[in-house]
């Protein structure tokens, strides 16, 4: 088998607007490999979502709740029809039309923020490499604490667009 690990304290965040960038980075990285430790690089390269890619890597994300004020397609259609009527019948200005479109766009659902990550297997894989790939998209100061089977403790800390392994300093 491998080196057994368990997850300790964790503070891990990716803003919704960075999720697609993280997905592209991990897919690009995986597409240049056939294997990635125990994992199938092809499945990761073909993932349609960041969740799907990280499921293959045996990590699961936790997300913020869905926004209450998101726009449904039916509501958007009604808003656009109203806007079209004002432009056609009332001669609304281009500026007015653009401001209405901006309002409509702002109400479409956005990617939810990642607010946590959970280990799904008990063995160390290629996390050091994988977390460095997505590090530019992870919020500064995020970390994942790990305890190894021999009691060794460390954190993967996300700073400056990189993921570094840091060991604790223990005083007696």
Image (cartoon, rainbow, N blue to C red):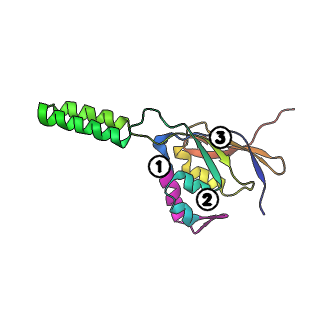
Q: Residue at x 56, y 56 (%)?
A: 53
Q: Is residue 5 above or below residue 110?
A: below
Of 42 and 65, the residue lying toward us: 65
Q: Is residue 69 left or right of residue 119?
A: left
The residue most toward the bottom is 34
For marks 2 and 1 on the same chain, the one whose residue lies earlier in the sequence? 1
Mark number for residue 56?
A: 2
Of 158 and 21, the residue lying toward us: 21
Of 38 and 69, the residue lying toward us: 69
Of 55 and 171, the residue lying toward us: 55
Report the residue marked by disc 3. 143
Circle 2/circle 1 CB separation < 8 Å? no
Q: Nearer the viewer, mark 2 or mark 1?
A: 2
For marks 3 and 2 on the same chain, the one whose residue lies earlier in the sequence? 2
Task: Locate the N terminus by quadrant.
Answer: bottom right
The residue range painted magenta reads 23-40
Give SS at disc 1: helix
Q: State the image coordinates of residue 29 (x, y, percent, origin top left).
A: 53, 59
Q: State the image coordinates of residue 14 (x, y, percent, origin top left).
A: 54, 41
Q: State the image coordinates of residue 138 (x, y, percent, origin top left).
A: 55, 42
Task: Locate the C terminus by quadrant.
Answer: top right
Quarter of the rendering containing residue 87: top left
Q: Is residue 88 left or right of residue 104?
A: left
Circle 3/circle 2 CB separation < 8 Å? no
Asked if residue 89 shows in the view, the reply is: yes
* 141 in the magenta segment: no
Q: CA distance from mark 3 to mark 1?
A: 19 Å
Q: Is residue 27 above or below residue 146?
A: below
Report the residue marked by disc 1. 21
Give SS at disc 3: strand
Asked if residue 91 shows in the view, the reply is: no
């Amino acid at each position: 088998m491998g080196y057994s690990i368990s997850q300790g304290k964790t503070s891990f965040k990716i803003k919704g607007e960075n999720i697609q960038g993280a997905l592209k980075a991990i897919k690009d990285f995986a597409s240049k490999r056939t294997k990635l430790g125990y994992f199938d690089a092809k499945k990761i390269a073909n993932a349609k979502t960041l969740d799907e890619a990280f499921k293959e890597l045996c990590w699961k994300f936790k997300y913020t709740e869905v926004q209450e004020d998101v726009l449904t397609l039916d509501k958007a259609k009604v808003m656009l029809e109203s806007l079209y009527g004002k432009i056609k019948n009332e001669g609304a200005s281009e500026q007015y039309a653009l401001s209405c479109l901006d309002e409509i766009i702002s109400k479409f659902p956005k990617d939810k923020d990642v607010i946590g990550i959970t280990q799904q297997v008990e063995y160390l894989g290629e996390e050091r490499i994988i977390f460095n790939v997505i590090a530019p998209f992870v919020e500064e100061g995020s970390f994942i604490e790990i305890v190894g089977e021999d009691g060794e403790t460390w954190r993967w800390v996300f700073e400056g667009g990189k993921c570094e392994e840091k060991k604790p300093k223990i005083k007696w």
